[in-house]
Amino acid sequence: MNVSEAVASRYSCRAFLQTRVPGEIVRAILDAARKTPSGGNLQPWRVFALTGEPLAELRTRVRARVMANPRGDGTHEYDIYPPGLGEPYRSRRFKCGEDLYATLGIAREDKLGRLMQLARNYDFFGAPVGLFFYLDRTMGPPQWSDVGMYMQTVMLLAREHGLHTCAQEIWSLVPATVAECLDVPSHLMLFAGMALGYADPAHPVNTLRTDRAPLEEFAVLRGFDIV
C-alpha cells in the first residue's frame, strides 16, 4: 500500500473486530512513526499503548466514572472546540454528527441513544488496542501540532498493516481517570486517545465517510502552470 492509498482508505473506525493485534505490529508502527517531523526536533509526544488485561482494567474504571456522566469525569485538559464555533465549521461539525447517528438509526430526539453512542468512545469502540498520546504541560500549540503529526503518521502506518484507527480527543475529558490507571506523571497532559484494530466491515457505522471541502475552498495556488 502506498501513501496515497493509505490516506484515501483511512477513516474514523467506530466498530472493531475482537481480533488480536500482535504486539510486534504495534511496536513497529509506533517505532516507525518516530520519523515524524517536530520543530527543533523536540519530539514532544509520549505514548501509552494498552491491550489485554491492562486495557480491560482501564475500561472497567472509566465505565464506572462515565456511567453517571458520559461527557467526562468533571475535569478536562482543553476545549476540544472553540466557544462560539463559527461558520463553516459549525455546519461541518453538525453534519458530521447527524450523518454518524443516521448510520446507526439513532434519531435526533433519541437523547439516550446518542449519549450511549458517545459513551462508546470510552470503550475504544471495542478495539483490542488503546493508545494515549501525551505531551509535557510546558509545551505550547506548536508542539501540539507535532503530536498531531505523530498521530497522523501512526494512523497511516496502521493502514499499511491492514489496521484501522479512530483518533479520539474525547479522552481529554477524563484525564484524571486515565492518569490513575496508567500512573501518568502530573507534568504530562493527555492530548488524545486512539482506537486501533481490525475494522468490523459488517457494522453500519463504518460506512460513514465524512465530506471534504473542495481544494478551491481552502487552497490558493499562484504561479503554477495548471490547465
Image: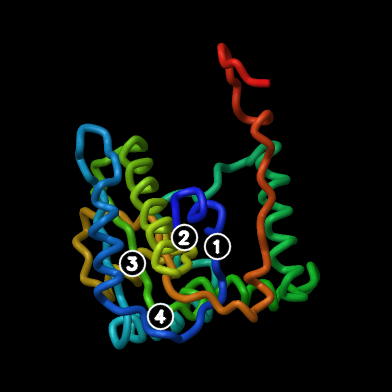
- The answer for how far apart the CA atoms under marks 2 and 3 are is 19 Å
Residue behind mark 2:
167
185 versus 91 height, above or below: below
Task: For residue 75, say whether it is visible.
Answer: no
- What percent of the width, then of the height, locates residue 200? 56, 79
- Give the amino acid type for the residue marked by disc 4 in the picture: Pro
Disc 3 crowd rating (10 Å Cα; few below 14, some 14-19, many 20+) is some
Q: Which mark is residue 128?
A: 4
- The answer for how far apart the CA atoms under marks 4 and 3 are is 22 Å
Q: Between disc 4 and disc 2, whose residue precedes?
A: 4
Q: Residue 12 carries which label?
A: 1
- Give the amino acid type for the residue marked by disc 3 in the picture: Ala
Left or right, 181 with reference to 73: left
Q: Between disc 3 and disc 1, whose residue precedes?
A: 1
- What percent of the width, then of the height, locates residue 2? 44, 53
- The answer for how far apart the CA atoms under marks 4 and 2 are is 15 Å
Q: The N terminus appears in which quarter of the rendering?
A: bottom left
Is residue 116 or residue 149 the one in the foreground? Answer: 149
Mark 2 or mark 3, whichever is nearer to me: 2
Secondary element under disc 2, as helix, strand or loop, is: strand
- Residue furthest top in the image: 223
- What percent of the width, then of the height, locates residue 210? 66, 55
- Give the amino acid type for the residue marked by disc 1 in the picture: Ser
- Quadrant for residue 156, please give it: bottom left
**Residue drawn at x 69%, y 65% as measured from the top left:** 100
- Give the amino acid type for the residue marked by disc 2 in the picture: Ala
Secondary element under disc 3, as helix, strand or loop, is: helix
Task: For residue 218, say whether it is visible.
Answer: yes
